[in-house]
Every structure is written in structure tokens, then in C-alpha cells.
Image: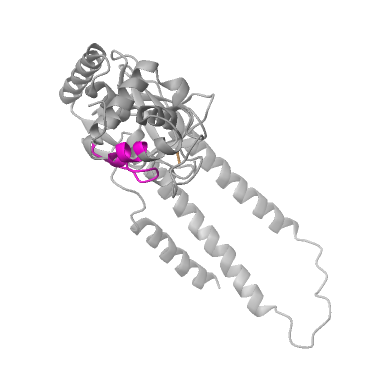
């Protein structure tokens, strides 16, 4: 039994270590976290094998024979065995907890020159702002390589979970609470924020791009965003402003709109919005503009047939200013071929 168990444990540990469980490492703490994971596997696989070997052996060896209805032998415990099976797990679990705490302490350590990024989850997208960098807002996450980042995460509606697998970080986004997590991206490339908490019908589409770029490229990007924000405000309700509202509010994660390059399919295709607004507006005795405005601010009032009810968030009402809604309505009707162009 012992030799079978030993062989099975060796094979199990080898398999656990050979399998590539995680994607590319793209943060300073990823290596440490992967090592922790490997150590946990090395410790737990032999224990699992030991328990299963003893259990299977006992089931086969000591099973009741046909017709045997007698009681088993009375056993009054074994003090030495009990001390061993309490002491060993206690030592193991305590050492692993200390090891885990050391790693956590290390990856959570404060570092100078930290970039703060606010992350907001909402059904069904993520938005980002850079409060220390001119309050730039963005619908994708752009980060400079090798600079520590502290994320401040919250949610506008339900619980989401902010996860970038390549960074090995994950933190819940909870309405009313700001959760924090630190990471230092150390590999230039394109990744994805994934929502890791079932949050509604659009949950599987709640993904947005992450780009880790050089420090100079990050500076250029920030400069561009600042200019765009200034220009948008100056244009005051033009198509560019409407498009910016569309992008920054995350509409594209649920709606397809060719002009904005989005392909969400939770809600109706907005390339056909003007036609829909004419048709359903008539039905509801509204102008096309009134129909679109109502669909954004009071989405429960009417749902386009064939689409899930109650999927569109109701949070845009408090979130968008009148000017932003005007710009968005004009933009959407304009690019879908209606009035307001
Ligand atoms: Cu947000 Cu799942």
C-alpha cells in the first residue's frame, strides 16, 4: 500500500507541476504567486493520495462479506495515532498560512511613485480614471510598464470581480465599498480585464482591454486623452462628444455600433436605432429623440421585443448630465441614419 501510494504521489506531483495552469506572467508578483501555488500543490497532492490510498485499501480489504451482519471489532481509539494526525496537519496548515501571509505582505507593500487608477464596475463594463493624472477617464485600461499601480475598485450596481489573469490579481467590486489592490505590470503587451463574478445577463461579455505600454507611450496616451476631453467639452454636444459618452459609459459592451467599433450583442444593434426609434416611437406616441432618451434614462419603460427585459442598467439617469444625454441621443440617431446629423 505504501509503495503504491508513494508512486501515485510522485506521478501526481509531477503532473501538477508539468501542467501549465496559468497564462503569461505580466506582473512583478506573478512569479511569487505561481511559486506559492506550486508549493500548495506539492504539499496537498501527496496528502490527497495518502487519504485515497488508505480509503480505497480499507474499502476493498475490510468490506462486509455477503451474509455478514455482525458488528465490527470494538475499537477504543489510539492515542499515539490521534496525536500524530492532529499535530502534522496543524504544523502543515500553520506553515502554509505563514508562507501565504509573507507573500501577501510582500505583494501588498507600499511603493514610491505609485500610479493610482480608479476602477468602476457596472453592468456590463469597466471604466477607469486616473485621478492623479488630470482626472483622465478611459474605457480601456492603459498602464505604464514597471510602475507600481494601486487600483481603487468600486461598483455602481451589483458585485463584480476585477480580474486580470496575467497580473494574477483579482478583487471584488462591491457597491458602497472601495476595495484596493496593488500590482506592478512588468511586461509590455495586451491583456484583458475579466469580470469573475456572475453579475447578470451580460456577465460573459464584461471584458475590456488592458494595455501595458512603455512610460513614454503612456505619457503620450495621457496627453491625447486630456486633449480629447478638453476638445469634447469645447465642441459642446457635437458628434465627437456623443461618441465619447458612448465609449466612456461602456454602451459598446452590450450594443453593436459600427461607428464606435463595438460588437456587443446583449441589447439591440444600435446601427438600426433610427429605424427602431421611428417604429417603436410611433407605437409609443413619442418622437424618435424622445424614444431614444427614454430608452437610456428609463430603460424599464419599454424593451425591444426579442431582447431580455431588465438587462439594461438603470444607472445612466444619475450618471449622465443633460448635455451628455443630448449629445448621445444626437450621435446615436445621426450614425444610425436618422435625424440629428
Ligand atoms: Cu460583472 Cu460579471
The relative height of residue 335 versus residue 319 in the rendered view (above or below) is: below
Confirm whether the magenta stretch covers residue 268: yes
Inspect the magenta stretch and tell me whether residue 137 lies in it: no
Q: To which quarter of the image does residue 131 belong?
A: top left
Task: From this view, report whether residue 104 is shown above or below residue 234.
Answer: below
Residue in view at x 61 percent, y 68 percent: 54
Residue 79 seen anywhere in this rendered image of the structure: yes
Q: Quadrant of the C terminus?
A: top left
Is residue 23 or residue 35 the one in the foreground? Answer: 23
Q: Position of residue 232 (x, y in %)?
A: 24, 17
Q: Position of residue 2 (x, y in %)?
A: 54, 70
Relative to the observer, which residue lies in front, 267 or 30? 267
Q: In the picture, which quadrant includes the N terminus?
A: bottom right
Q: Nearer the viewer, residue 268 or 127?
A: 268
Which stretch did the figure color magenta? 261-278
| Residue found farthest to the bottom | 67
Q: In the visual, does 257 lie left or right of 83?
A: left
Q: Residue at x 69, y 58 (%)?
A: 81
Residue 26: image quadrant is top left
Q: Report whether 4 appears left or right of 275.
A: right
**Location of residue 316 in the rendering, given as x and y in whole percent from the top left corner:** 44, 26
In the figure, is residue 224 to the left or right of 30?
left
Figure quarter occupied by ligand 1: top left
Q: Is residue 140 visible?
A: no
Percent position (x, y) of residue 181? 42, 28
Query: How was the colour assigned to the protein in this rendering?
Result: one colour
Write the residue at 45% across / 47% down: 305
Amino acid at each position: 500500500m505504501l509503495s503504491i501510494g508513494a508512486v501515485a504521489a510522485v506521478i501526481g506531483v509531477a503532473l501538477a507541476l508539468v501542467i501549465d495552469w496559468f497564462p503569461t506572467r505580466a506582473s512583478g508578483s506573478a512569479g511569487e504567486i505561481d511559486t506559492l501555488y506550486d508549493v500548495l500543490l506539492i504539499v496537498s497532492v501527496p496528502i490527497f493520495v495518502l487519504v485515497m490510498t488508505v480509503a480505497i485499501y480499507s474499502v476493498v480489504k475490510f468490506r462486509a462479506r455477503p451474509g455478514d451482519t455482525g458488528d465490527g471489532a470494538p475499537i477504543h481509539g489510539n492515542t499515539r495515532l490521534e496525536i500524530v494526525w492532529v499535530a502534522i496537519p496543524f504544523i502543515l496548515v500553520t506553515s502554509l498560512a505563514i508562507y501565504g501571509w509573507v507573500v501577501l505582505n510582500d505583494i501588498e507593500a507600499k511603493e514610491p511613485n505609485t500610479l493610482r487608477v480608479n476602477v468602476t464596475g457596472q453592468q456590463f463594463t469597466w471604466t477607469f480614471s486616473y485621478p492623479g493624472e488630470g482626472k483622465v477617464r478611459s474605457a480601456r485600461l492603459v498602464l505604464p510598464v514597471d510602475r507600481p499601480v494601486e487600483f481603487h475598485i468600486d461598483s455602481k450596481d451589483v458585485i463584480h470581480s476585477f480580474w486580470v489573469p496575467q497580473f494574477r490579481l483579482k478583487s471584488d467590486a462591491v457597491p458602497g465599498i472601495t476595495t484596493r489592490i496593488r500590482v506592478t505590470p512588468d511586461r509590455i503587451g495586451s491583456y484583458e480585464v475579466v469580470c469573475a463574478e456572475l453579475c447578470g445577463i451580460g456577465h460573459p461579455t464584461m471584458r475590456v482591454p488592458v494595455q501595458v505600454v512603455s512610460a513614454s507611450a503612456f505619457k503620450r496616451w495621457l496627453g491625447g486623452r486630456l486633449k480629447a476631453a478638453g476638445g469634447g467639452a469645447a465642441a459642446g454636444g457635437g458628434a465627437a462628444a456623443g461618441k465619447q459618452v458612448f465609449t466612456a459609459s461602456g454602451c459598446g459592451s452590450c450594443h453593436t455600433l459600427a461607428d464606435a467599433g463595438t460588437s456587443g450583442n446583449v441589447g439591440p444593434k444600435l446601427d438600426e436605432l433610427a429605424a427602431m426609434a421611428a417604429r417603436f416611437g410611433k407605437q409609443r406616441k413619442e418622437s424618435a429623440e424622445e424614444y431614444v432618451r427614454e430608452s437610456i434614462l428609463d430603460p424599464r419603460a419599454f424593451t425591444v421585443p426579442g431582447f431580455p427585459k431588465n438587462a439594461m442598467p438603470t444607472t445612466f439617469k444619475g450618471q449622465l448630465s443633460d448635455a451628455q444625454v443630448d449629445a448621445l441621443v444626437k450621435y446615436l440617431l445621426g450614425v444610425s441614419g436618422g435625424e440629428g446629423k
